Image: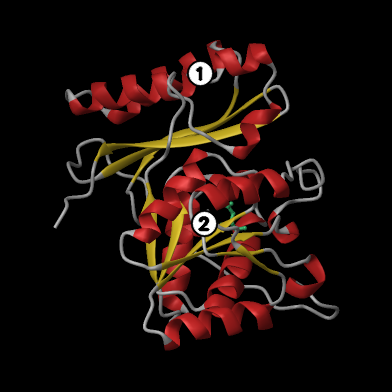
Amino acid sequence: MSSPLVLRTVAELRRTVAGWRAAGERVALVPTMGALHPGHVSLAGIGRRTCTRIVVSIFVNPTQFAPNEDFSAYPRTFEADLAALEAERIDAVFAPGVPDMYPDGFCTTVSLAGPAAAGLEDRFRPTHFAGVATVVSKLLIRCLPDVAVFGEKDWQQLAVIRRAARDLDIPVDILGGPTIRESDGLAMSSRNVYLTPEERAAAPLLHRVMTRCAERIRAGEPASTAMAEGRAAIEAGGFALDYLETRDPDSLAPVADDASGPLRMLVAARIGRTRLIDNIAVRPVAQH
Ligand code: PAF
């Protein structure tokens, strides 16, 4: 087992990646904000299917947090993250500082529409996706990987990033990695550490309700009826619900009850001081 290289600046990252490319290797980037859990590790595994070198970036990106959000409280566990990545044979960790990513005078932001304005996360975090798309564009342009892998747990984020990479002609394959769940169904998330024991016990309700609603829709019940009951069940379980919706998986546009195409269910709800998001396929996109 050897420790991953720790790269702090764009110059170090570019030099390292250029050396690999000159040797004919393929490079995958897994962008993260650290506080790594098995979900992140699984994304590196997806990169490894087609690439020989894996870079994991760890950067808690200030521009995607609103002033009232948890930027300063966000868990930072760099030493434990490095140890986890060493066990996974990761080649390099790119961990820039804020001044390296956003030097004095930085004033450029990616402006988004389409899936970024679907009325889901954007309704509750109006500045979030501009921060995500800006930092992800910077990370992709800095690293120029062949592949970049993002978790499907942040489904709207994945749709936004796919669209932005396509629109900005960033030459990278964006891949999604399936959500990794605890044995009781709770989606793994760095923010789960905020949950008190009581909240942690209640949290799997979101996945249970979504699973039940999806079964009912697949059995022929109108999505609007199943969703209304799902919303009530989540609120009865002690959550403050932001949304529970079914949408087109790519555009995230609303879908009529009588439509038969692919359908994704997405939820966001708050319990105590923690905001949880999750999503599942109701009717998956056809595989080619
Ligand atoms: O999903 C995350 O951890 C972050 O939003 C990302 C994609 C690393 C951008 O900061």
Locate residue 244, reporting x and y percent. 46, 31
Is residue 285 in sight in this rendering?
A: yes
Colouring mode (rainbow / by chain / secondary structure / one colour): secondary structure
Locate residue 127, reporting x and y percent. 67, 57
**Disc 2 residue lies near ligand 1 with CB under 8 A:** no
Identify the disc placed on residue 234. Answer: 1
Q: Give the image quarter of residue 167.
A: bottom left
Q: Is mark 1 on a helix, strand or loop?
A: helix
Q: Residue shown at 72%/61% (left/top)?
A: 63
| Residue found farthest to the bottom | 22
Image quadrant of ligand 1 equals bottom right
Cα distance in 3D space between marks 2 and 1: 24 Å
Q: Residue shown at 60%/18% (left/top)?
A: 200
158, 194: nearer the viewer: 194
Label 1 crowd bin: few (<14), some (14–19), many (20+), radius 10 Å: many
Q: What element carries label 2?
A: helix
| Residue found farthest to the right | 104
Q: Which amino acid does label 1 sit on?
A: Ile
Is residue 228 in sight in this rendering?
A: no
Q: Which of the two labelled residues, at mark 2 and mark 1, occupies the earlier sequence position?
A: 2
Residue 280 drawn above or below residue 9:
above
Quadrant where the C terminus lies? bottom left
Locate residue 53, reporting x and y percent. 44, 68
Q: What residue is shown with label 2?
A: 117
Q: Which amino acid does label 2 sit on?
A: Ala
Q: Give the image quarter of residue 110.
A: bottom right
243, 215: nearer the viewer: 215
In the displayed structure image, the side of residue 176 where residue 191 appears, left or right: right
Identify the disc placed on residue 11. Answer: none
Q: Residue shown at 69%/63% (left/top)?
A: 95
